[in-house]
Image (cartoon, grey):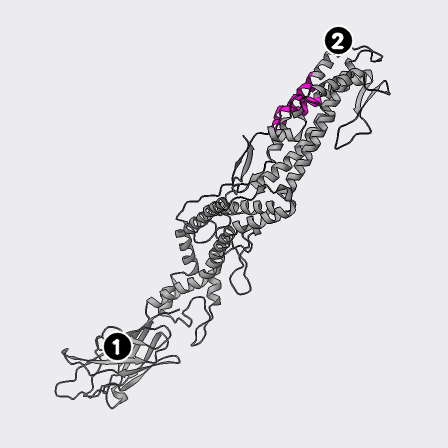
Amino acid sequence: MLVTSTVTLMVTTARAQAVGVAEPVVSLQGAVATAQLTATRRTPFGSDVTIDDSGRLVLKAPPAGKRLDLAPNGAFVGNLFKGSDVARVYVSGKPETTTPGVWLLPVRLAGVGHPGDYKGTLSPSRSGDLKQATRIELKVTDWWIWPLLAVLLGAAISALPQIYIRRWRIEGKLHDRHRAFEPAYEKAERSFRQHFAHWEQIKRPSREDVERYAGVVDDAIRSYAKSTWYFDTTSSGYMKILTSIEIVERDAGCLGAADGLGKSLDDLVTARARLADFIGEDFPVDRPPAIALAASAFLRRGRLAVGEATTRAATAKDYVDLIKRWREMARAVRRYEVWCSVFESVGVPTKKNLSPEEWAQLREANGLVQQAKNELLDAGDAHALDRLGTEAHLEGTYSRLGSLGGQHRVWVVPGSGDDAEGGAHLETWIDGEQVPLPETARESLKVLAEVAPEYTTGTTAWTENAAPLEVSPATAVELGQTKRFVGDAMVVILAAADLRHVGRLRDGDLCGNGWPGFPQAGHGCPHPIPRLRSACGDLRPDAGDDDGGCPRLATPPRAAIGAAAARPPRRSAPRPRPQAAPGSARRR
C-alpha cells in the first residue's frame, strides 16, 4: 500500500548570536525562538520529503553594515533526530533578501525515512560555528492520499478473495451448467437408445428448444449478477435460477438412466397388459375404463419437450401404482356382485328366509357396488378416484353384505387359487360348506362378458382411442434487476477498512506502528495476513477462524453448484424456497 507523509520543521535559536550571522525570526516577546517547520513525505516508502510552503528557513537580516556569512548552496548544515532516524538538512540555493528585515535561506531534507517529530540544531553559517547554531523542530507527515490508498488496498486484499469465492466462482459454475444442457441431452439420448431400443420413436428435446431454455437461464444469471455484489445462495432469485438448471439436469439424467424414463414406460406397458387380461377374464365391463385410456396417452411416441422425460417417467410410475390399486378395488366389486347374486338366487338352502328389512339391505349393497363399479370406469386418475369416494362405497357394501352373511351363513370369499397378478378365483360357502357358484351368478357374468365391446379389453384399442397428450414444456425463471449491489459494495468497503484509520496512518508510518492492525516490523513492511484476517472477520463475523487466514466459508450443498460459496451476510430473514414449475404433461 502507498501512503504519504507530511513533515514539520521547528527552529530554535541560541541566546548568544554571533554578529554578522543571520538569526531566526523571534515572534515571542523575549522568549527563546522556536522555528517550527512542516514537511510532507511524497512517497510512502522513500525519503522524498519536501518542506511545506516556501521551503525556506526564515532568518533575521543582519544589522546595517554587518556582513552575512551563510553556508553556500549544497552545504550540509546539520542533522535532525527522531530516535534512531536521522534527517539531514542541506542548503538548496542562495538566500533571498527581497523581504525587508528577513533573509530566506532555502533548505532541503534528505534521509527522512519515517514520519514523526524531528529535533536538532542547524548551523547556517559558513563556518559552522555551534555558537551561531539555530534550534529546529521538524514535523514530517505522509501525503494524505497514501493513507486513503492504503485503506482501499486493504479492502481490496480482503474483498477480492471473497468476490472470487462468493461471486465469480459461483457465477462461472452456473454458466458452465447451463452450457452443458445440450451435451447432456445428446449423451442421454445415446444411452436411451442403448438400453431401450424398442422405444426408438421417442426422441430427446430438439436443439432449438434446449438452446432457447438455456438462453433464458443465461439471462437470469446475468440479471442476478448485475443486481448483487455477492451471490446469496439462500436468496429467492438464486434458488429460482438453481431450480431452472436442475430441471434440465434431472430431465437429461432421467432420459439416459437405465432405471429412468424407459423403464417407467416398460413398467406401464406391463401393468396395462395385466389390466387388459384382468378385464377380459374376470371383470367384464361395457365400456373402456378411463384409467386405461389415460395411461395409454402417456405411451405416445415422438419428440420430447424440455423437462418432459422427468414428468412422464413420474406419471408413468403413478399410473402403475394406480392400476394395481384399481384392480384390487375391481376384485372387490366382482366379489360383491357375486355375493349379491348368491343371495338373490332361487333355491339357496339358507336356514332362514330374508326379511323385508334384509331385502332392503341387500338392495342397498347391490346399489353401492354398482355405483363403485361405475366410478372405477369413470376415474382417469387417483385424484378422481378419491374425489368420487369409491373406496368408501366399497366399505359400505361390505358392511351390509357382511352383516347378512353373518346372519345367514352365506359367504363369497377369494379362493386359495388366487393369483395376485391375474383374476381372483371366488369360493362360495353356505352353512359352513363350500358349494359351487350358483348358476344364476355364472350366467349373469357370462352374459355381461358376451355383450362387452371388444375395444374395452384390448391394449391396441386403448392406444387408438386415447386422447391426444398435451405437453407443457418446462419454463425457466426470468429475473429483473435490483440495486442490491450498492448496499453490498458499501458493506464490503466499510467492513474491510475503517476510514477512521486514514488520519492515524497519515500521522504514522505505513510500514510501522501507525498501521492499524499490523505488528511493528522495523523499517520493512509487515505481513498482510493480520489486516486481511481483520477485514475478513468484519465481513464474516459469524464464521470460524481458519488457523490464521480468513474465516472458513460455509459450503452450500451440491445443489448449490458443487464447491459452493460462503453465505453472505443476510439483511433479512430467509424466504421460503420457491418451486419452479417443471414441465408437465396432461390429457387434453
Inspect the magenta stretch and tell me whether residue 378 lies in it.
yes
Q: Position of 78 compared to 531: left or right? A: left
SS at circle 2: helix
Number of marks in the rendered image: 2
Residue 562 picture location, percent across and down = 56, 54
Q: Position of 86 compared to 569: left or right? A: left
- The disc label shown at residue 522, or none: none
Furthest residue toward bottom? 127
- Sequence-wise, which precedes: disc 1 or disc 2? 1
SS at circle 1: strand
Front-most of residues 247 and 147: 247
- The disc label shown at residue 35, or none: 1
Front-most of residues 79 and 556: 556
Judge whether residue 153 can be spotted in this image: yes
Judge whether residue 557 can be spotted in this image: no
The residue that disc 2 covers is: 356
Kind of residue indicated by mark 2: Pro
Q: CA distance from mark 1 to mark 2?
A: 131 Å
Magenta stretch, main secondary structure class: helix
Front-most of residues 536 and 195: 195
For label 2, count other residues whose C-alpha is less than 10 Å away and answer few (under 14), some (14-19) or many (20+).
few
Residue range in magenta is: 367-395
Q: Residue at x 69, y 36 (%)?
A: 270
Residue 376 picture location, percent across and down = 66, 25
Residue 228 picture location, percent across and down = 43, 51
